[in-house]
Image: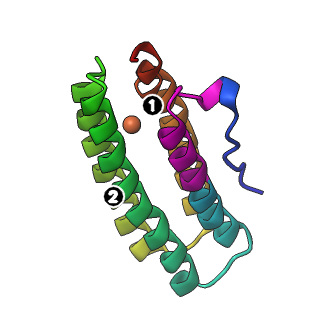
Amino acid sequence: MLQKMIWTEAMYGTGDATVDEQHRKLFDLINAVLDHLDQKKTAGETARAWQAMEEYTKTHFSCEEDIMEKKKCSACDANKKAHHIFLNSIERLATLFKTSGPTEEFGKEFQKFISSWFRMHIMAIDAKLRETA
Ligand SMILES: [Fe+2]
């Protein structure tokens, strides 16, 4: 079983209710992809869950960037750069998925990347929102 994303205030809280709510929704969509991989759903079904996750990630990133800009957050530029790098990585994984399909190996690689990236990113960058008004 691939380990799922569990949002807790202590670990992922940013002090901004909108960002926190979007992170929870994003974790749900990531978990849906992980569930599809666990349950060995077809490539087509898994690709649809992936698409939903990827689209919402983009929506969330631009919304979060606007919030940081409005709040004059010190991590604003670093956040935009990190989001850009993440989207490149997720595209690389999407390409890998297209060639390998929903294999166990792909599931492990995706889970490892996504859990470590969000843990680091939210704690190191998004949490800077706590320092804003
Ligand atoms: Fe972010």
Farthest residue to the right: give it: 1
**Secondary structure of residue under mark 2:** helix
Q: Taking the image as drawn, is residue 105 in sight?
A: no
Mark 1 belongs to which amino acid?
His
Q: Is residue 128 left or right of residue 43?
A: left
Residue at mark 1: C-beta within 8 A of ligand 1: yes
Residue 121 is labelled as 1
Name above or below for residue 41 compared with residue 131: below
Picture quarter containing residue 94? bottom left
Q: Which residues are magenta?
A: 11-27
**Mark 2 and mark 1 in contact (Cβ < 8 Å)?**
no
Label 2, residues with CA under 10 Å away: few <14, some 14-19, many ≥20: few
Q: Which residue is mark 2?
A: 92
Q: Marks 1 and 2, Cα distance to the nearest angstrom?
A: 19 Å
The residue sitting at 43% across, 61% down in the picture is 56
Q: Is residue 132 left or right of residue 35?
A: left
